Image (cartoon, rainbow, N blue to C red):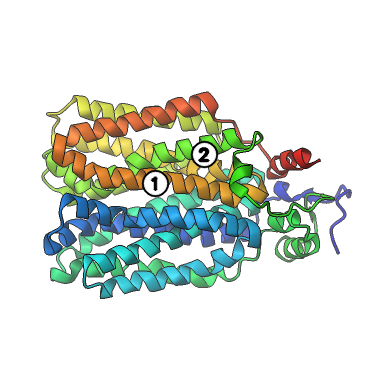
Amino acid sequence: MIPNLNSSRHLEFEESPLRGFHVQVAIAGSGGQFSDGFVLGIVGSTIEMIASRLHLTAVGVGALAAASLAGLLLGALLAGPIADRIGRRPIFAWDMLVFTVLSASQWLATSVEQLLLIRLFLGVTLGADYVASKALVTEYCPLRYRGRLLSILAVAWTAGYGAASCVGFALRNFGPDAWRWMLLSSALPAAAIFPFRLSIPESPLWLVNRGNTQAAADIVARKFGKYLALPHTNRSIQPTAVLWKSLFSVTWRTNTLVACLFYVCQVAPFFAIGTFFPRVLAVLRVQDSHLGSLVYAFFLLSGALLGLLIVDRLPRRAFLVASFYGAAITLGALTAWPNASSVATLSLFALFSAVLSAATNLEYVYTPELFPTELRASGVGLAVAFSRLGAGAATFLLPVIMQSVGVHAALVACISVLVLGGMGCQLWAPETRNARLADTDGRTRARLG
């Protein structure tokens, strides 16, 4: 029986106290993010080995580094509308199995073309998971705990990225096939999380928006008990013919612009510097680039944990703007101090990584909050696609810029992107910290009449 929405003994769905199932959903989502961070991070440990054995040029190195990012762009664009039309669960439940198979197949690659193709499809799978995971976890989270639960995904991504550095460090002396072992290892976390994904049902909020209130109520009663009331609606929102048109409608275009802008400006320098961090350190005369990468990874994880602790304590907009300017200042100090010692260089990079990593929590928290349920997956997918376009371009261009005009010019380019992100968010970013998803959906219902 559907809960009585007018009964005072029923809490609204988003006002639920924290339950074990909320944590279970967050952990199931975080497994995909760990795998994503790992597969994107491990290429930084392997790329120099692959380049030397396959005699790659700077363009070839950039293409290999950017292959998964290009696939992510395509996967996010395709999966967003699909997840909004057929639901979040079909993608969420099965994409980690596909990811496991593709990751394992990297061991069999015998040419750079094969490896590029595999990593492109890995990226497509990851793009689909980004969209489905963020939408599904967001729609299960209680308002009071949404920031912290979604931040678990950000911490998991950073942990995966950092774990890749540790695995790369541990396997670096495994002979001529060390790079194969490193790439193969990315299959393990995906295989481990796949069984847990199968136990997560469809998003109740998505079902309500499709008019399937009884199925949504059954899920809520089974997982949380019968004391939670789903949002009441007399209208079923059907998938629009052109979801992109809706995202750029008068109602949502500012949110769409902000989501794309902040995501691009945040991840472009993050991926560009992270992927080629050992090479950047070598140019800056830091002797042990492997040790430097481990220090960088440690502060990435520390920053992500810090972000988890403060994300619900600060206004989203203030956190976002301050992180852009803070990261730009640390890179600016590094650029203005070309003769810094190894310790000073690593310290500035560590501070940069901690600030930017703390802010990556907002990719998981803020982006889904900007869109209503019927457009959430498409909006997140579009933002992810734009971000990976920027990250892929930055990752492709960074080694070329370093080779042509030097590492300091490359750092200045990263600073410019960060300042652009800070200025754009200062002008246009809305505040969403205390916004209920049901109220966001109500804006669409009001427009529909």
Quarter assignment of residue 197? bottom right
**Image check: 446 left or right of 62?**
right
- Image location (x, y in percent) of residue 245: 61, 43
Residue beneath disc 2? 259
Quadrant of the snapshot with the C terminus: top right
**Image check: 317 left or right of 139?**
left
Residue type (three-letter) at the residue carrying disc 1: Leu
How many residues crowd around disc 1 within 10 Å: few (fewer than 14), some, or many (20 or more)?
many
Q: Name which residue lies at 22% across and 63% down.
A: 170
Q: Secondary structure at mark 2?
A: helix
* Relative vertical location of residue 405 with respect to residue 168 in this rendering, above or below: above
* Relative vertical location of residue 230 with respect to residue 266 in this rendering, above or below: below
Q: Name which residue lies at 32% across and 73% down.
A: 105
Q: Nearer the viewer, residue 408 or 195?
A: 408
**Image check: 427 left or right of 369?**
left
Q: Earlier in the sequence, mark 1 or mark 2?
A: 2
Residue type (three-letter) at the residue carrying disc 2: Ala
* Relative vertical location of residue 129 with respect to residue 260 in this rendering, above or below: below
Q: Can residue 365 be seen?
A: yes
* Relative vertical location of residue 301 with respect to residue 96 in this rendering, above or below: above
Quarter assignment of residue 81? bottom right
Q: Secondary structure at mark 1?
A: helix
- Image location (x, y in percent) of residue 11: 78, 49
- Image location (x, y in percent) of residue 281: 17, 42
Quarter assignment of residue 338? top left
Quadrant of the snapshot with the N terminus: bottom right
Q: Nearer the viewer, residue 352 or 85?
A: 85
Residue beneath disc 1? 389
Question: Which of the two discs, 1 and 2, sits closer to the camera?
Answer: 1
